[in-house]
Image (tube, helix red, strand yellow):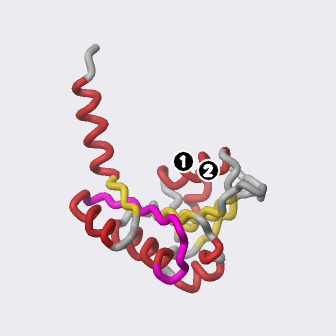
Amino acid sequence: MTSDARRVIIVGCGRVGGMVAEALLEQGDDVTILDTNQEHFRRLREHARLHMVAADGTSVETLRSVNAGGAEVFIALAAADTTNALAAQTAHVLFRVPRVVCRINDPQRRDMYGRLGLRAVSSSRVVADLVLGVMGEEE
């Protein structure tokens, strides 16, 4: 890990999690990605700064085993809002990770998670905004 590299933990190695991991690796970050389905890791290329762990990212024991307390960034990108919220809240409260980002599919929950101190991104809201933006573009 280079001196300016961040330690990043990602929960969820679906399409979005895989894309975020690849982008962070290209930026020089050290990435640990957790997913309960080991097959999902096939999306990723082998990389010296990539650590793939087949485990539950909501488990305190799992997060302790990957040294979540030493991470600078924690990103919850699993498919389920409840998984993301629990993993992000655990990283924020128990492990005191300074920057926690949580994907929330339900835009109505986004503000609630924000009040809990989580940076929440509503993927549904982002896609809706993009579609409306494209509709408004002139050809």
Measured as percent of width and height from the top left, residue 5 is found at: 70, 56
Q: Which residues are magenta?
A: 93-106
Report if residue 102 lies within the magenta region: yes
**Residue at image x 59%, y 51%?**
43
- Of residues 133 and 6, the one nearer the viewer is 6
Q: Label 2: how many residues lie within 10 Å, few (<14), some (14-19) or many (20+)?
A: some
Q: Which mark is residue 19?
A: 1
The quarter of the picture where the N terminus appears is bottom right
Specify whether 122 is left or right of 39.
left
> In x, y percent, where is residue 95?
55, 80
Image mark for residue 24:
2
Marks 1 and 2, how far apart in space? Answer: 9 Å
Q: SS of the residue at dot 2? A: helix
Find residue 19 and report its horizontal and vertical position in percent: 54, 48
Left or right position of 111 against 86: left
The image position of residue 81, as x and y in percent, is 34, 66
Residue at 50% of width from left, 83% of height from top?
94
Query: Mark 1 vs mark 2: which is more N-terminal?
Result: 1
Query: Does the segment drawn in magenta span residue 68?
Result: no
Which quadrant is the C terminus positioned in?
Answer: top left
Identified at 77% across, 57% down, the residue is 3
